[in-house]
Image: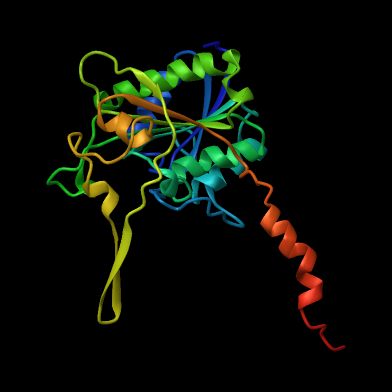
């Protein structure tokens, strides 16, 4: 990784989180890193944008009182040198599956960068579900070691290797460290979706049942998916594109041709 490489680093867990500090320390050994991150936890906010945000200067960098997407726009357009690469993370908790991509602030930061034509890496740490509620789980910097190692490796090599000629961003999900470095598997996002809802009087509770079934012995996700790779101890790297693509549909073309023949004209 060249010392001349400029990286914009952001996240959605907030500028004071352990994950972003660990990633900053790793990346800044060999690159110029500018941190522009939310002032507080903005997890699962998707690509929400603000019209105006306050900015504080902290020891690590700029703390934006807004969303990860705000941070990327502010960082690229105003606060920092224009970077070669945007890195988002390291997120506490995995970002796996197609349906999660639009909800995640970590992923959304990478997507926002793509609209600026800046390649990006979004890195998340898979934390297996246990008896402790997830929001009470505390992780040390050492537990991010695998995530920071692979992110640094990709930041160092992916640009020169031409990876971003074919992908707008990489969604990287990493297991907790387990002695030897984990292998990388190039994956696709899982298509599983198991949301449901339950009403109790005036309240409706939404349940995401995907995360309750992450047992390696019974995981229903097929080979090649991000969820299977990370649960089985491999680093999942999904090369993804943005903006969203469109497909040609003959059936929709036919509807467009007959539209004016089948609707009544309006008066006036």
Q: Nearer the viewer, residue 217 or 112?
A: 217
Image quarter for residue 12?
top left
Residue for point 54% across, 32% down: 169
Image coords of residue 84 (percent x, y) = 61, 24
Q: Nearer the viewer, residue 224 or 23?
A: 224
Image coords of residue 146 (percent x, y) = 31, 21
Q: Is residue 215 found left or right of 68 in the rendered image?
A: left
Residue that lies at the very extreme toward the left in this rendered image? 131
Q: How many marks?
A: 0
Image quarter for residue 49?
bottom right
Residue 84 visible: no
Residue that lies at the very extreme toward the right in this rendered image? 268
Q: Is residue 260 above or below residue 119?
A: below
Residue for point 29% across, 81% down: 202
- Quadrant the C terminus occupies: bottom right
Residue for point 57% across, 13% down: 161
Q: Is residue 220 found left or right of 35 in the rendered image?
A: left
Q: Is residue 221 found left or right of 48 in the rendered image?
A: left
What colour scheme was applied to this rendering of the protein?
Answer: rainbow
Residue for point 38% across, 34% down: 225
Image coords of residue 27 (percent x, y) = 45, 20
Residue 224 visible: yes
Q: Is residue 216 above or below residue 191?
A: above
Image coords of residue 136 (percent x, y) = 20, 47
Q: Nearer the viewer, residue 160 or 29?
A: 160
């Amino acid at each position: 990784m060249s010392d001349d490489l400029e990286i914009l680093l952001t996240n959605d867990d907030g500028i004071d989180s352990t994950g972003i500090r660990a990633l900053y320390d790793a990346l800044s050994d060999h690159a110029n890193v500018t941190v522009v991150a939310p002032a507080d936890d903005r997890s699962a906010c998707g690509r929400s944008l603000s019209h105006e945000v306050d900015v504080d200067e902290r020891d690590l960098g700029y703390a934006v009182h807004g969303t990860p997407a705000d941070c990327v726009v502010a960082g690229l357009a105003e606060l920092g040198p224009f970077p070669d690469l945007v890195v988002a993370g390291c997120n506490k908790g995995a970002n796996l599956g197609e349906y999660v991509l639009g909800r995640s602030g970590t992923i959304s930061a990478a997507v926002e960068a793509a609209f600026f034509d800046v390649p990006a890496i979004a890195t998340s740490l898979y934390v297996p579900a246990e008896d402790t509620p997830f929001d009470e789980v505390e992780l040390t910097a050492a537990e991010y070691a695998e995530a920071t190692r692979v992110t640094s490796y990709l930041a160092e090599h992916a640009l020169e290797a031409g990876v971003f000629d074919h992908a707008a961003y990489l969604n990287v999900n990493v297991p907790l460290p387990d002695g030897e470095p984990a292998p990388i598997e190039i994956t696709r996002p899982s298509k599983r979706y198991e949301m449901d809802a339950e009403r109790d009087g005036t309240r409706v509770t939404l349940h995401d049942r995907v995360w309750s079934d992450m047992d390696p012995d019974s995981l229903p996700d097929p080979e090649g998916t991000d969820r299977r790779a990370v649960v089985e101890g491999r680093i999942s790297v999904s090369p993804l594109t943005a903006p969203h693509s469109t497909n040609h549909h003959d059936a929709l073309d036919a509807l467009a041709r007959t539209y004016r023949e089948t609707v009544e004209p309006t008066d006036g």
